[in-house]
């Protein structure tokens, strides 16, 4: 990562084995690759908008990185199954809970998928914050936070209010990680 120097902290929070969900802010299309490179001891799976998979080169490239397509405009049962399969097989599942790139984090705009998958699969959520820019030779900082466990919800059906509350809490932690990274001199 010579063109984009990356400072990484908190990698010790990534489980050495077993499934988890990595929940991060999403500022650039390079985010999945950067996060995967920061976590070299684990392979990640992640959802990517289905439009990317229309191009055969992109399909091969993103597929080889662990991506699978998701239709962001409709309920997508195959991507839901792929995500649960990845977690069942013990992979880390990278999710950008806002569903798209956003320059500024809005903790109230998170979709509920992270909470739903974590509860359904009984796995921890690892929050991550990315700060900086992807301009050549500028610096990025990636900070991973302590795992968030939702054990009190395992085996239960979540109500929409509970999902919203959980997601605001998770995204607040992600927001704190991005603020801390912005304050860190790189």
Image: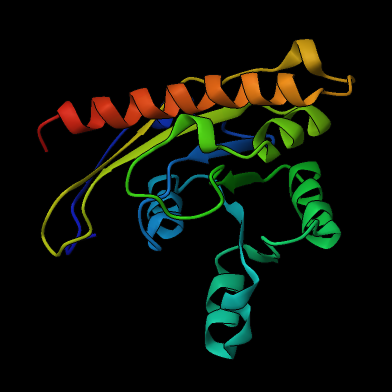
Q: Where is residue 172 in the image (x, y as percent from the top left)?
A: 45, 22
Q: Position of residue 114 (x, y in %)?
A: 65, 36
Q: Which residue lies furthest to the top in this view?
A: 152
Q: Residue furthest bottom?
A: 56
Describe residue 107's horizontal placement relative to residue 75 as left or right.
Answer: left
Q: Quadrant of the C terminus?
A: top left
Q: Quadrant of the N terminus?
A: bottom left
* Residue positioned 65% across, 25% down in the render: 164
Above or below, 69 against 79 in this view is: below
Describe residue 126's horizontal placement relative to residue 27 as left or right.
Answer: right
* Residue positioned 83% across, 19% down in the render: 154
* Residue positioned 38% across, 46% down in the render: 38
Q: Where is residue 101 in the image (x, y as percent from the top left)?
A: 43, 55
Count of labels in the image: 0
Toward which corner of the image does residue 181 lie, by quadrant?
top left
Q: Where is residue 45 in the image (x, y as percent from the top left)?
A: 62, 54
Toward which corner of the image does residue 8 lie, by quadrant?
top left
Describe residue 22's horizontal placement relative to residue 179 as left or right.
Answer: right
Residue nearest the viewer, comparing 161 with 31: 161
| Colour style of the rendered protein structure | rainbow
Residue nearest the viewer, comparing 136 with 9: 136
* Residue positioned 80% across, 33% down in the render: 121
Above or below, 52 against 42 in this view is: below
Above or below, 108 against 25 in this view is: above
Residue nearest the viewer, comparing 143 with 25: 25
């Amino acid at each position: 990562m010579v063109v984009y120097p990356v400072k990484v902290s908190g990698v010790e929070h990534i489980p050495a084995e077993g499934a988890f969900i990595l929940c991060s802010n999403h500022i650039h299309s390079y985010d999945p690759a950067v996060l995967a490179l920061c976590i070299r001891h684990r392979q990640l799976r992640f959802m990517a908008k289905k439009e990317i998979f229309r191009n055969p080169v992109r399909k091969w490239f993103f597929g080889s990185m662990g991506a699978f397509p998701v239709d962001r405009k409709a309920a997508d049962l195959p991507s839901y199954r792929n995500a649960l399969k990845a977690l069942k097989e013990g992979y880390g599942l990278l999710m950008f809970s806002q569903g798209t790139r956003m320059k500024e984090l809005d903790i109230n705009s998170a979709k509920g998928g992270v909470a739903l998958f974590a509860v359904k699969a009984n796995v921890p959520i690892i929050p991550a914050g990315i700060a900086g820019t992807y301009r050549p030779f500028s610096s990025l900082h990636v900070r991973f936070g302590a795992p968030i466990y939702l054990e009190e919800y395992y085996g239960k059906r979540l109500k929409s209010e509970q999902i919203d509350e959980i997601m605001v809490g998770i995204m607040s932690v992600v927001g704190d990680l991005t603020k801390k990274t912005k304050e860190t001199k790189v």
